[in-house]
Image (spheres, coloured by chain):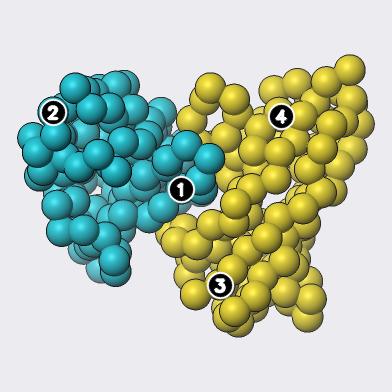
Chain colours: A cyan, B yellow
Amino acid sequence: DIVMTQSPDSLAVSLGERATINCKSSQSLLSSSNNNDYLAWYEQKPGQPPNLLISWASTRESGVPDRFSGSGSGTDFTLTISSLQAEDVAVYYCMQYYSAPITFGQGTRLEIK
Amino acid sequence: EVQLVESGGGLVQPGGSLRLSCVASGSTFSSYYMHWVRRAPGKGLQWVANIRQDSSDKHYIDSVKGRFTISRDNAKSSLYLEMNSVRAEDTAMYYCAAGGGYLIDQWGRGTLVTVSS
């Protein structure tokens, strides 16, 4: 199974400042057949289901604010929120969909400082 | 876009059984790869199982193999999770989820399963 490890476990950032969450996979998520990384980012707010933010490591989903961006390839990935807003308080997860079983990182809790 | 509504959760005793259902609307259910994902209290997301559009392929996490069965009925736009021999560690919110493949891009609001005597 592919193990996903996020850092940090929790993060407190001031409004308007940058937030950075890292995700490392135990094996490469880069497909040699299509040159895509099978890595997604989700946010989950209290009482709500998860919401897909980023797919293929760096493709922002429709309707997701452009302050959210994803980067990285292979085994190391990053989610960046360029200017933190109050509504961004949530738990963030990376997920690999390269192979079954699909696996998530343990989550990063983002709070306002 | 597909709307997903789960049902069937509740309180069940250890060793008991439960059947979760998920009804889809708004789009062609048969075109979606379907998944069950859970979140235990105080824990993170955990993918549980998935099933291909035509039911020809299914996968499970090791901890539920032999106890849980995923199935679907495309004519009824429905997904199921048969849960047998449940354990305390199966206590969680269970989400029905959909995608074109292994990427999950649609989620239901969840149904809560509590395993306790």
Q: Residue A14, which numbered label?
A: 2
For mark 4, name the chain: B
Residue of label 3: B2
**In the image, farthest residue toward the top:** B117
Q: CA distance from mark 2 to mark 4?
A: 37 Å
Q: Position of residue A5 (x, y in %)?
A: 33, 28
Left or right of B86? Residue A26 is left
Residue of label 4: B90
- Tell me which amino acid carries mark 4: Asp
Q: Position of residue B50 (x, y in %)?
A: 61, 55
- Tell me which amino acid carries mark 3: Val
Residue visible at 37% across and 44% down? A43
- Tell me which amino acid carries mark 2: Ser
Q: Nearer the viewer, mark 3 or mark 2?
A: 2
Left or right of B98? Residue A107 is left
Residue visible at 21% across and 34% down? A21
Q: Position of residue B6 (x, y in %)?
A: 71, 55
Same chain for the residues under marks 3 and 2 in the image: no
